[in-house]
Amino acid sequence: KGPRAGEKGPETIGKVPDVSVGAGKVYPDSRVVVTQPAKGVYKAFDARCPHQGCLVEKVEQGVINCPCHGSQFDVNDGSKVRGPATTGLPELPAKVVDGDIVVG
């Protein structure tokens, strides 16, 4: 599928309005999930669940959800909330540039 967003340098993956405060958005083609835990604070994580590599799917009620086996991760820091995953999602560098979300 090619490299994950940011693996070969900074990459624009979305727009600020795509990511609501307290929620997030999964960018499956980039294999990245971006959250906004607090107004103006954007976090990016590898969207591959560390359990078996499935892509996380929904971000709701403060958690990032993996559809394969039910693992959940905190929107603030990607830490594991519920297994079977034994670790959290790796955080990636993220910033906003002219209204775009840039990862890497």
Image (cartoon, rainbow, N blue to C red):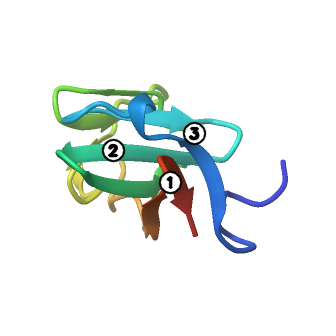
User: Hey, which residue is sitting farthest bottom in the picture?
Assistant: 9
Q: Which residue is mark 3?
A: 54
In this image, 29 relative to 53: left or right? right
Among the two numbered marks 3 and 2 on one chain, the one whose residue lies closer to the N terminus: 2
Around disc 2, counting alpha carbons within 10 Å, would you say few (fewer than 14), some (14 to 19), or many (20 or more)?
A: many
Q: Position of residue 104 (x, y in %)?
A: 58, 70
| Mark 1 residue type | Asp
Q: Which residue is mark 1?
A: 98
Q: CA distance from mark 3 to mark 2?
A: 18 Å
Secondary structure of the residue carrying tag 2 is strand
Circles 1 and 2: CB atoms closer than 8 Å: no
At x 70% / y 74%, what residue is drawn? 9
Among the two numbered marks 1 and 2 on one chain, the one whose residue lies closer to the N terminus: 2
Q: Looking at the image, which is closer to me, 37 or 70?
A: 37
At x 32% / y 58%, what residue is drawn? 86
Among the two numbered marks 1 and 3 on one chain, the one whose residue lies closer to the N terminus: 3
Secondary structure of the residue carrying tag 3 is loop
Q: Nearer the viewer, mark 1 or mark 2?
A: 1
At x 61% / y 47%, what residue is drawn? 13
In this image, 102 relative to 61: left or right? right
Q: Which residue is mark 2?
A: 35
Q: How many marks are shown on the rendered structure?
A: 3
Around disc 1, counting alpha carbons within 10 Å, would you say few (fewer than 14), some (14 to 19), or many (20 or more)?
A: few
